Image (cartoon, rainbow, N blue to C red):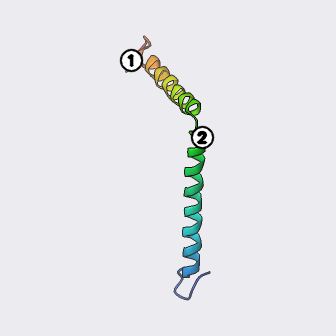
Amino acid sequence: MRNKSGGFSPPSHILLALLLFLLASFSFFLGAYMFRTPEARKQKIDEYKREILSKIKRRNLPGPRE
């Protein structure tokens, strides 16, 4: 919906804002759903710990350095 000046008419902006709001809300509630239980939080923390420890181990391996 373009007007004569080439810009979008206000209803399109309203729809775009509504779409972005719904997307942000969905993302927030999906994150809240995934971390709602202590077990899920602990599992995610353990994943992060494993990832960080593997990066540290890779850096500490003996080998040629630049």
In the picture, the quarter occupied by the N terminus is bottom right
Q: Is residue 55 positioned above or below 20 on the image?
A: above
Which of the 4 image quadrants contains residue 42? top right
**Are there few (<14), some (14-19), or many (20+) residues within 10 Å of tag 1?**
few
Q: Residue at the spot x=43%, y=20% of the render? A: 56
Residue at the spot 57% in from the left edge and 40% down from the top edge? 36
- Number of labels in the image equals 2
Q: CA distance from mark 2 to mark 1?
A: 41 Å
Q: Which mark is residue 65?
A: 1
Query: In the rendered image of this protein, does residue 20 appear above or below residue 37?
Result: below
Q: Where residue 43 appears, x then y in whole percent?
A: 57, 28
Q: For the C terminus, which image quadrant?
A: top left
Q: Farthest residue toward the right?
A: 1
**On the image, numbered disc 2 is attached to which residue?**
34
- Where residue 12 is drawn, which disc sits there? none
Residue farthest bottom in this picture: 4
Residue located at (52% from left, 86% from top):
5
Image coordinates of residue 35 in percent, x first then y, are 56, 39
The correct choice, above or below, for 41 with respect to 20 in the image is above
Closest to the observer: 56 or 34? 34
Amino acid carrying mark 1 in the image: Arg
